[in-house]
Amino acid sequence: MTKAIQALEKRVEELENQSAFQDELIESLNNTVAKQDREVLELKHQLSRLSERLKDIGDATSGAAPQDETPPHY
């Protein structure tokens, strides 16, 4: 019976080690996802600002003189 108990104790210890490793891994992955979420939000804000700037530039150049425009056949 002692061998069976020792085997069970060893198995429980291995499961506890796996659980601890998985807890650490989950925490690490959670931190990574949170960081990436912040980065994605910042990139969305940057993209929005760039889009607005391009729109402003397009609006400013839309009144360009006809002699500056390329003819349609080019």
Image: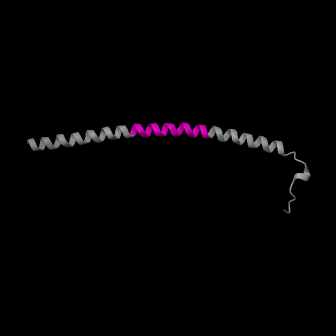
Q: Quadrant of residue 57?
A: top right
Main SS class of the magenta portion in the image: helix
Quadrant (top left, top right, bottom left, bottom right) of the C terminus: bottom right
Q: Residue at x 38, y 40 (%)?
A: 25
Q: Could you say where residue 72 lies in the image, as x and y percent from the top left?
A: 86, 60
The picture quadrant where one finds residue 2 is top left
Number of marks present in the image shown: 0
Residue at the spot 60% in from the left edge and 37% down from the top edge = 42
Q: Residue at x 78, y 40 (%)?
A: 56
Give the residue displayed 13% in from the left and 41% down from the top: 6
Q: Residue furthest bottom?
A: 73
Q: Quadrant of residue 59?
A: top right
Whole-percent x and y of residue 35?
50, 37
Q: Is residue 40 magenta?
A: yes
32 in the magenta segment = yes
Which image quarter is the N terminus in?
top left
Query: For this view, does 40 lie left or right of residue 56?
Result: left
Residue farthest to the left, as pictured = 1
Horizontally, residue 27 falls left or right of residue 55, namely: left
The answer to whether 36 is drawn above or below residue 68 in the figure is above
Q: 9 or 31, which lies in front?
A: 31
Left or right: 1 as drawn, with respect to 24? left
Q: Whole-percent x and y of residue 14?
A: 24, 42
Provide the residue span drawn in magenta.
Answer: 26-43
Residue 23 place in picture, x, y as percent: 35, 37
